[in-house]
Image (cartoon, helix red, strand yellow):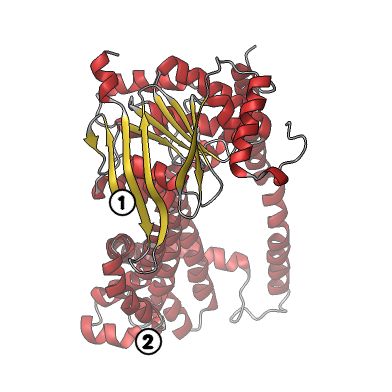
Amino acid sequence: MSTVQQNATIAQLSALRDKSAVLKRVAMRPFSSRLLGLIVPAIGVLLWEVLARTGFLQPNILPAPTVIAQTILELARSGELWKHTGITLWRITTGFLLGAFAGTLLGALTGYLSLARKLLDPLLQSLRNIPSMAWVPLFLLWLGIQESSKIGLISLGAFFPVYLNLSTAMSHVDPKLIEVGRVYRLSGIQMIRRVILPAALPEYIVGLRSGLGLAWMFVVAAEIMGASRGLGFLMIDGQMTGRASIILASVILFACLGKATDFLLETAGRSFLRYKTK
Amino acid sequence: MSSADVVNSSLDIQSVSKTFGSNGDGLLALRDINLHIRPGEFTCVVGGSGCGKTTLLRIIAGLERAYSGSVTLGGNSISGPGLDRGIVFQEHRLLPWLTVEQNVGFGLSELPSAERRERVARYIDLVGLRGFEQAYPHQLSGGMAQRVAIARALVSHPKLLLLDEPFGALDALTRIRMQQELLRIWQAQRTTMIFVTHDIDEAIYLADRIVIMSPRPGTIKQIFQVEMPRPRDRAGLQLTELRKSIYREFFTEEDLPEDYEI
């Protein structure tokens, strides 16, 4: 066996070993650690149920988990649930897409051109420091009480993380990899497409995910400040009518939907970043 | 290769000087470098850090502009990077999101895909990595990654392969193996090689000609012709004699240890 072959075999073996180690890690997660993570919440819910049933917790303050589940079922049966989650999901989707689109555009511009960065970044950075709720009156004044002010607010929430992550990642691409692009005489566009964007992609996906998280935060704010439909409205409605089970049902729905959309984005992102885990 | 090609691919470096920084307080990195490199020749450039050997290589690669003097390859003045010169850096600089195959084919995007595939396969084979086409750089050892980098540099059929301390970050045993591999590839391809290193033994083992550079400012101090047939015996008498004379270029007699056999 030549040294080359020997080398190759050794490397092949170690590659296999790495791969099986990764597989083992992935496989272990659902069985042991995920199960472990469920124990404490399960005990908590059980305790909560018992305390509510035995009258230790007042039903108008903290209703039993089964009562909340029943509320959700009733909402679903009456069609209320779909009406409210539908409009909330629509707002999130449009707002997030708009904000992410603007963030991608400006992030790429400032990340690639240092002149654009010098011109725009200080302004955007200072706007970022304005607390989110401070925008609410302005957006109401500018865009009215209808959908556009809500979507505007949500897209603002999604914009900053996307902008910030993409801009930083693109301007910090390893200059040594850029030089490889120069060796192969890539044009500006080719350099962006073949070197800069793939290198910035992991951080960009992180930006999209935190943008989506903020979009969910802002949708609550937007729907609380004035809406006649949506999960945020349902919450306020529950508060006005003194029904804690409605409030808690909306909270749980927010949590589930937020997690679900993040999962979708994470899965999509992971398929782009396969090279990291393979 | 026809004789016209041979004439056409020689590298001529004439009175090249390079200053970094502004005019007044600039640092003179290279002063009056003259070097003629024949096609197919294996040249090693040896010197300590700061002697300008990497700068010289980067000028040939077209990565450093704004120098004085002239550098021509096959009669054409070098004004920027080009596929007629392949380069291997000290770090492998593979793109982490591309497979071995995609990395090797990175500069071939203009070729039709069938031809590209065929050529990529041939060069992956040449560097001994068949079976690793679909691996990603992080799955490779340092030596393997550097083989991929060599394949990537050679796949576009450059006239000149520039290597900037390519084995400097590898462990001693892998380095020796890679030196043997590089010689094998050179003998198969007959690409002109310019190999920058600070390792005198590496240069003695590899080169037809060893260019010794000295720092502040970077100048060529001495050129040694190595007329020994390959494969060379690293501990052989002739190499030992040559090593002695090269060491003398770097150290004065009293610096020299009694026995500097390695």
Secondary structure at numbered mark 1: loop
Q: Amino acid at mark 2?
A: Ala
| Same-chain status of marks 2 and 1 | no
- To which quarter of the image does residue B85 belong? top left
Which chain does the numbered disc 1 sit on? Answer: B
Q: Which mark is residue A134?
A: 2
Q: Position of residue A62 (x, y in %)?
A: 62, 77
Q: Amino acid at mark 1?
A: Tyr
Left or right relative to A246: residue A39: right
Count of picture labels: 2
Vertical relation: B204 (above or below) A33: above
| Residue B141 visible within the image | no
- The residue carrying pointer 2 sits among few (fewer than 14), some (14 to 19) or many (20 or more) residues within 10 Å by Cα, namely few
Secondary structure at numbered mark 2: helix
Tell me what residue is drawn at x 51 percent, y 65 percent.
A255
Q: CA distance from mark 2 to mark 1?
A: 56 Å
- Residue identifier under label 1: B67
Q: Which mark is residue A173?
A: none
Q: Position of residue A37 (x, y in %)?
A: 69, 56
Which chain does the numbered disc 2 sit on? Answer: A
Marks 2, 1: nearer the viewer = 1
Vertical relation: B85 (above or below) A128: above
Disc 2 + disc 1, Cβ < 8 Å? no
Left or right relative to B168: residue B82: left
- Residue at the extreme right of the image, as rendered: B258
Q: Position of residue B101 (x, y in %)?
A: 42, 28
Vertical relation: A189 (above or below) B72: below
Q: Position of residue B259 (x, y in %)?
A: 77, 34
Q: What quarter of the picture does the C terminus of chain A occupy? A: top right
